């Protein structure tokens, strides 16, 4: 392995995936992308279109299809970032998350096994911890009891990856991301607030009671941490390792609203809170407090450039066009 090889990114037209493609290409990798474009956009990959190092196939990972399997051939690693990331959707349409997250991951693992691909990097999530009783939450926290179908689908995928690692020798890097934000994002609290305030600058509906407190990480930091850990996996010969990927602090939903209002130059905005549960969550399955213990990650020599508030402000500025992505 090494820079200049061939890797595949599933979900590479999506938010995190497209930024990962940018970084891999910048490091000299040839990159194959498989994406069904259900939430991603070819516009996110426009700078790579037609380049010799880049291949794109529109494929549905819910089915083992030669169309996308052929993209996997010869890859030294697969970065599996294709998923349905909408936690709220998983509450009302659980089968969708089972198929797009669990079934798709199984098919990716089968393709890796059949083609002898040695390494998988998997985008997991902090929601596998559920309502953790230990905060900051370390990777070895138990029991893992997700409270959303999304979190359960990611944990099921983690367990399948672990089994493939033990049975077939697949090297696996499982990354439990905090809330990742930045340019190209098309969902989440920052995007939601900007959209609502553009429609009505005097009133902002906030899902939950505003006290929800979570860790946010800018996508540039998330991708930087991902490739840092991938290189460590190669250099140190890990078989399977799990890492939390996040910032050291957290921020409330109310504080995010304040930052968005300030950056949009608004004043006298009425906040209207819409709690979906008696304890003030934004929706059933919403983890109210999340802060990851990132000591394992930082022990490898990596640290984030921006804390949660800085990441939020930078993202708002980028989405508003006040700062270049």
Image: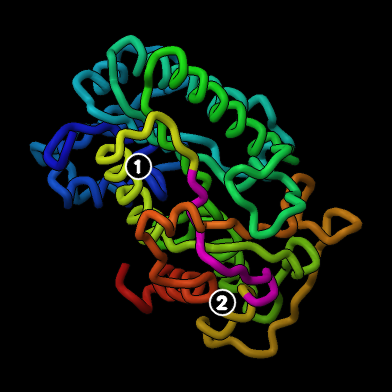
Percent x, y for residue 186?
Answer: 49, 54
Vertical relation: 116 (above or below) 312 = above
Vertical relation: 269 (above or below) 193 = below
The residue segment tinted magenta is 243-255
Vertical relation: 14 (above or below) 265 = above
Residue bearing the label numbered 1: 13
Residue bearing the label numbered 2: 260
> Which quadrant holds the N terminus?
top left
Vertical relation: 273 (above or below) 25 = below
How busy is the neighbourhood of tag 1: few (under 14 within 10 Å), some, or many (20 plus)? many
Is residue 42 visible from the viewing direction of this image? no
First in residue order: circle 2 vs circle 1 = 1
> Disc 2 and disc 1: Cα gap in Å?
26 Å
Percent x, y for residue 138?
Answer: 60, 50
Residue depicted at x 35% and y 53% = 223
The secondary element bearing badge 2 is classed as: helix
């Amino acid at each position: 392995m090494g820079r200049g090889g061939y890797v595949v990114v599933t979900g590479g037209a999506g938010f995190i995936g497209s930024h990962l493609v940018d970084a891999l290409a910048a490091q000299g990798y040839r990159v194959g992308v498989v994406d069904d474009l259900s939430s991603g956009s070819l516009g996110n990959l426009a700078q790579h279109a037609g380049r010799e190092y880049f291949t794109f196939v529109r494929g549905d990972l819910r089915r083992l299809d030669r169309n996308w399997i052929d993209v996997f051939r010869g890859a030294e690693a697969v970065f599996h970032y294709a998923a349905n990331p909408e936690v709220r959707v998983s509450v009302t349409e659980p089968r969708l998350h089972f198929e797009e997250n669990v079934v798709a991951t199984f098919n990716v693992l089968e393709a890796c096994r059949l083609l002898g691909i040695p390494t998988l990097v998997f985008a997991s999530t902090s929601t596998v911890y559920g309502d953790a009783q230990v905060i900051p939450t370390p990777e070895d926290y138990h029991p893992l009891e997700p409270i959303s179908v999304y979190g359960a689908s990611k944990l099921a995928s983690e367990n399948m990856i672990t089994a493939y690692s033990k049975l077939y020798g697949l090297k696996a890097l499982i990354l439990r991301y905090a809330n990742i934000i930045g340019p190209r994002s098309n969902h989440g609290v920052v995007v939601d607030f900007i959209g609502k305030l553009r429609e009505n600058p005097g009133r902002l509906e906030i899902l939950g009671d505003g006290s929800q407190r979570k860790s946010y990480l800018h996508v540039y930091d998330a991708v930087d941490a991902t490739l840092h850990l991938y290189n460590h996996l190669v250099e140190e010969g890990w078989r399977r390792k799990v890492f939390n990927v996040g910032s050291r602090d957290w921020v409330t939903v109310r504080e995010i609203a304040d930052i968005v209002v300030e950056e949009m130059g608004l004043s006298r905005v009425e906040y209207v809170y819409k709690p979906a549960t008696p304890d003030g969550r934004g929706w059933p399955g919403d983890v109210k407090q999340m802060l990851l213990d990132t000591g394992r990650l930082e022990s490898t020599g990596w640290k984030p450039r921006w804390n949660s508030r800085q990441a939020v402000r930078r993202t708002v500025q980028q989405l508003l066009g006040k700062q270049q992505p």
